[in-house]
Image: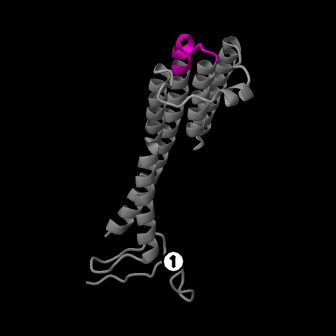
Amino acid sequence: MKRHVMQPPGSDMNMPRPPDNWEYTSGESMPDPLAERISACRASIRTLERRAYAGVYILSAFILISIGATLDFSFLPSFPPAIRKGMGGAPPAGFISIALAVYVFSASILSLSRMMEGSDKTGGIAHLGYLGAFFFFYHACGDLETHFWAVFAGGATVLILESYQRWYYCREEIQKEREILAGMERCLRRD
C-alpha cells in the first residue's frame, strides 16, 4: 500500500502547509530544501572540525619564533647603522617586562571571558605578532637570553588559552549541528 506523500513546505503556495511529521516512501527522494540543509549541516561540521585545531598551528608558529629567538635571530639580516640610529635606543628591559606582564594578564583575562560567554572571537595571529615583538624588544636591548623564558612561558599560556577557547567553542557548535542533523535524519527514517 502506497502512502500519500505530502509536499515540502513552501513548494506550492496553494496547498495547505503540511504537518511537521510528513513522511517519505522508500522510492521517493527527499525534498531539495531538506537535502540542502543536511548538506549544509555536514559542511558546517567539517568546517568547525578544521577550525577547532587552528590554534595548534599558531602555537607551532610561536614555537618556531621562539627557536629563532634562542638563536638570537642570527638567521635574519641585521639593520644597517642608519636605520638602527633612526629607530633610537631600545627601551629598558624593566619596562619591557612590565609591558609583558600586563599583556599576559590582560590577554588571559580576555580569553577566559570569551570562553565564558561562548564567543567565537580569538586573537590568535595578533598574539603571535605581539609575542614576536616582545622577543624583538628584548633582542634590541641585548637582554633576550635573560628574559627568553618569561616571554616563552607567557606566550605559551596565552596561546594555549586561546587554542582551548577556540576548540571548546567549535566542539559545542559541532554538538549542536550533530543534534540538528540527527533530528533531520530521524525525520527521513520515520515510517
Say whether residue 21 is visible: no
Q: Nearest the camera: 116 or 10?
A: 116
Horizontal side, residue 136 vs residue 53: left or right: right
Prevailing secondary structure class for the magenta stretch in the rendered image: helix
Q: Quadrant of residue 183?
A: bottom left
Comparing 21 with 123, the one in front is: 123
Which residue shows up at 64% across the image and 31% down it?
110
| Magenta-highlighted residues | 141-152
Number of numbered callouts drawn: 1
Q: Position of residue 99 (x, y in %)?
A: 69, 20
Q: Which residue is depicted at the point 43% across and 81% down?
A: 6
Q: Position of residue 125 (x, y in %)?
A: 56, 39
- Is 105 placed left or right of 68 in the picture? right
51 left or right of 129? left
Q: Residue at x 32, y 80 (%)?
A: 28
Q: Residue furthest front?
A: 81
Look at the image and say whether residue 151 sits in the magenta stretch.
yes
169 in relation to 130, above or below? below
Q: Which residue is mark 1?
A: 9
